[in-house]
Image (tube, rainbow, N blue to C red):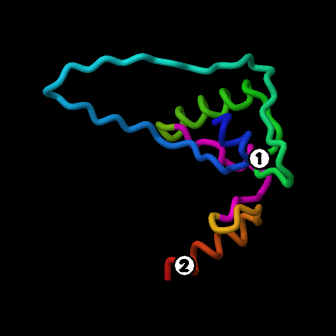
Amino acid sequence: MGMQAWSNGLYKSVEHRVMPNPHLERFSVAYFMCPSNETVIESSAQPAIYRKFNFGEYRQQVQQDVRRTGHKVGLTRNDLSVGLALDSVTNECISWTKYAKERIISSI
């Protein structure tokens, strides 16, 4: 989450999908980065894809998303984005409208 916002969308958050081998013993080490609720998360790149928000806002959004959908929606939800997307070819910020049109056209 934080890396995606800090990098202005250059690095993406991915869904964690571990497929353990059922025939081998598995050891896990959990590591969490959990800043204070007041910690501000924003990108120095301009224009920014995501608005400036704090970790408390993000935690609250994740909890609402999980209650509503059963999983974390992530930063693409409109209340954290500012209506921009990162062009995968040029790495430039483009509007969500242009981004959506390009995706529709490329899928035809």
User: Which residue is drawn at the image coordinates 74% and 43% (left, top)?
Assistant: 80
Highlighted range, magenta = 72-87
Q: Residues within 10 Å of mark 1 (few under 14, many from 20)?
A: many
**Is residue 20 rendered to the left or right of residue 53?**
left
Whole-Å distance between the Cαs marked 1 and 2? 25 Å
User: Which residue is drawn at the image coordinates 53% and 34% (left, top)?
Assistant: 66
Q: Which residue is mark 2?
A: 106
Q: Amino acid at mark 1?
A: Tyr
Q: Amino acid at mark 2?
A: Ser
**Is residue 21 rendered to the left or right of residue 60?**
left
Q: Looking at this view, is 16 or 75 the one in front?
A: 16
Vertical position of residue 33 compared to residue 45: above or below: above
Q: Which residue is mark 1?
A: 50
Mark number, residue 40 = none
Q: Is residue 79 magenta?
A: yes
**Residue most extreme to the front:** 90
| Residue 96 percent location from the top left of the image | 72, 64
Q: Earlier in the sequence, mark 1 or mark 2?
A: 1
Vertical position of residue 22 compared to residue 65: above or below: above
| Residue 27 percent location from the top left of the image | 31, 17
On-image quarter of the N terminus: top right
Q: Main secondary structure of the magenta part?
A: loop
User: Which residue is drawn at the image coordinates 46% and 17% (left, top)?
Assistant: 30
What is the secondary structure assignment of the residue under circle 1?
loop
Vertical position of residue 78 compared to residue 37: above or below: below
